[in-house]
Each structure stands twice: as C-alpha cells, then as structure tokens.
Amino acid sequence: MLKRELGILLLVGCLILASVPTALCRSPAPNVYVAGDGSGDFNCDGKDDHVQINQALKFVADNSEYTTVHLKGPFTYVINDTLLISSNTILEGDSTAVIKLVDHAGWVTMKPLIKQMSNSGNNNIVIRGFEVNVNHDGNTEFAKGKGYYNVIYFLYCNNVTVCDMYMHDGHGDGLRIKYGENVKFYNNTIYKLGHDGLFAIQCQNVEAWNNTITCRTNSGLRIWNSNHVKFHDNLIDSFYNWSAGGPGIQIEKSAGIMDDIEIYNNVIHNTYGQGIWIFNYDTADATKDEGKNIHIYHNIFYDTGTNPSITWVGGILESGFHDTVIENNVFDSEYNVAIDSMSPDGFFSNYSSKYITIVRNNIIVNTQKRTKNPSGTGYGIANDLPNTHSFVLENNCLYNNSAGNYKNCSSKVDIHIRPLFVDQENHDYHLQSRGGTWNGKTWVKYKVSSPCIDSGYPSSDYSNEPEDNGNRINIGRYGNTIYASKSKH
C-alpha cells in the first residue's frame, strides 16, 4: 500500500514538472533566455519568432522571481506581431541579437513592434542592448511618418528606460511614449527611422543623452506638451535626401505647462531642417507663463538647414515661448539664419503676448543663404515676428555672416571679429590662447589669443573655467566649462 501511494505521488510530481515551462528548469532566476540555436529556455527558428519571445515575456510577467528576458545572439528573430512587455520587466539582448520585422507585414497604423502588455499601462520597464531592423525596404507599401511600424510605443507607462539599442531603417518612431513619467533614453544609435528617434507626448521627467541619431522624415528628439526635460550630449544629423526630415530637436506646445526644458552639450549638424525648432500654437496664448524658461547652452551647430524646399530652416527657430535663454553655443555655416523668431510660412504666428529671448555669449559665424528663396537670408540673428517677439543680445561674437549680423534686432555689446577657433574646418571650436588651449589631452599654447576669451557677459558664471580665467566667462561653446581656454592676459 505504501509503495502504491509513493508511486502515485511520483507520477503526480512528474506530471506537474512536465507542465512547468522549461525556463524554470534551465535558467535560475532572474533570467529567461531566448535563443535561435536550441540553447534557450524558449527557442526560435527565424519564423514567427514573436510567439516564443512573447511566451518568455508572459512567463516573466507571471513569475515575480524572474525579471529579464534575454535574447541570445548571433541570431535574427523575425517577428510578425507585436511583442508585449509587462511591469518590472527587462527585455535585453546581445548586441548580435536582431529583431527584424517580417517582409510585407501589413500592420495597421500605430501597431508597434514592442508595446506594454496592459492597455492601462505598465511600469518599471527596461529595453536594452540589442538591434532592431524595422525592415523599411521590405515594407514599402506604406509611407514614412504616418505611424506605421514604430519600434516602441508605450501608453500610461512610468519609469521607462531604453538604452544601448541600435534601431534602424524604419517607417516610424524609435521610442514613442504618451502619458508617461520618468523616461530615460540613452546610449542608443538611431539610423534612418521614419519619424522621430524619441517622441514624448504629454510626459513628465524625460531625459535623453549620449544618443547618435541620423534623422529621416522628422526629428531626432521631440517633445510635445511635455515638461521637466533634459536633452544633452547627443550627436544628431541627417542624410541629404528629399525624405531626410526636419529638425534635430523639436519642442512643441499646444496645451499644458512647459517651463523646465534644458538642451545642452549636443552637436547638431547637417540637419535637413532646423537644428532646434521651438514653437507654440496653444490657443491659450495669453497664458505665456505656461510656456517659458527653455535653456539652450553649450551646443555646437553647423551646416543645419540643408532642405532646399522649405524656408523655415536654420540653427534655432523659435516662437511663442517666453524667457528662452540661448547662451554659450557655436553656430557655424547655418543655412538661412543662426537664431530667428519666426513661424513657418506664417503658421503658428497669431500671438497676442510679448515674448523675450535672451541670446548671450554665443559665437555665430558664416551664416549662409538658404536654398529656397535665398534673397534676404543669411543673417546671424533675425526677428521675423517683431510685433510680438524681441531679443536681448548680450556679448555675442558675430562674424562673416553673408547678409549681415542682425535683422530687426541690434546690440551695443556684441563683438564682430574673427573668433580664432583652433580648427574650424574640422569643427574644433576651442579658442586659440596664449595662456593655453585644451586639445583633448593637454594644454597647448598658441601665438595668438581669441578675442572671445574673457569677453562674455560680465554677470555670467565663470567658476568652472580653469585658472587663469581672467575672472570673466569666455564667449562660445566652452565658456564656463573645465575646457575653457585660459586667459589671454
């Protein structure tokens, strides 16, 4: 009788173990592995691989001791449906692991490759480390920029991190997130997606840094009705093509409060549209305190605005935001204008409030005429909305701008002289100095000193500059940084 009972218990135990996913048997918590060579807890064959990946994600969602689905490489996982990720989940992969959209997927608009599992939102999500090939050339049935095949689209999700990804050749966005909080987007390489690299809509606390983005169809980084935002240390450009897109960074407001936005330490160059485009078409224009205090500093812009078919190109184009501060940037060879208050062809220009933009300690050189309707273009700083917008210009250096330095604005304290960059042709915008210039490894002394050293706005902070700093900030990208050229005295 005892042997019989033991046999029954053993049989029941085996049946229970047989029903448990192999992930519990092969991989200790917290990782579940997906592979293409049979070595995973869930194994794919290069066809309809969303099935096994979703099984792995569902297993993690249902077993709280597990946190991570890891895609093994080298393998290309071909998917024909959306991957669904839950709260408290990491989806990661080897750098040789590739998720690829199937040819001729035929999905409806706004159906992404990756989304949250719950329609009401999920939290604490990390996506990192692998490649996504959105297979643009295998899905040419649909136009770019219309919401097809976004890589990631999250709604009502908080604490979202997307990092160390390579996302390329798509129709839509890299990360599109709406109604989210605490969004981090960093160390990603974005190449020729079909809309924005990052598009945050009605989000709070968004930070994007150390991304390398080549735009196609729209912008590299974009926010719409979002606040508490930092975009920094990114490298953004676009390729030259009729579909090459718009601005490097786009700041857009139609409602709500946007009064805490910082854009710094970026290099933005050869964009098809503007370097940065800032515009407000909020119908509550009288409440200008809801759109203010954008701070743009320590950026480098060159050759932005290559689009031959539109007029709203340049370095920074802005309208409808109050007390924007643009300081310690370099603008070199911008098309049309380096800094302008303007609206594209008259759109978004029905303003009734008065808006002030403060421009200080910038170097603006070699602005060139735009391609479309070039007559009257090529200014350093222009104000094309003089009835409602005005500039305060303080201690900038403007030189060799093709149409002149100013249009509908002026300054009594700017200087107009060659800034003496170290190597402008190769975009090294450090200032030559007899006292010492940082070359990336050591301090080098030049025979001459730039007139921009110790010539910035007298009240600007210079405390981060190395001694001898002349007790005054330098004009240009490196003013008030540890890489500022030393005093010329």
Image (tube, rainbow, N blue to C red):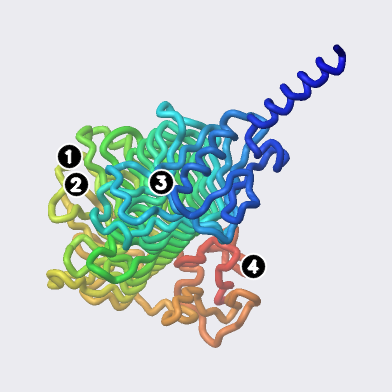
Where in the figure is residue 410, as x and y percent of width and height? Answer: 26, 62
- Secondary structure of the residue carrying tag 4 is loop
Task: Identify the residue position indicated by label 2 in the image.
Answer: 388
Where in the figure is residue 53, as x and y percent of width and height? Answer: 52, 43
Crowding around mark 2 (Cα neighbors within 10 Å: few <14, some 14 to 19, many 20+) is some
Crowding around mark 4 (Cα neighbors within 10 Å: few <14, some 14 to 19, many 20+) is some
CA distance for labels 3 and 1 = 43 Å
Task: Identify the residue position indicated by label 1 in the image.
Answer: 352
Q: Amino acid at mark 2?
A: Thr
Task: Name the front one of labels 4 and 1.
Answer: 1
Task: Name the front one of labels 4 and 2.
Answer: 2
Task: Name the front one of labels 3 and 1.
Answer: 3
User: Which mark is on residue 467?
Assistant: 4
Does any portion of residue 359 appear in the rendered image?
no
Q: Amino acid at mark 3?
A: Leu
Q: Earlier in the sequence, mark 2 or mark 3?
A: 3
Of residues 114 and 421, which is closer to you in this image?
114
Q: Earlier in the sequence, mark 2 or mark 1?
A: 1
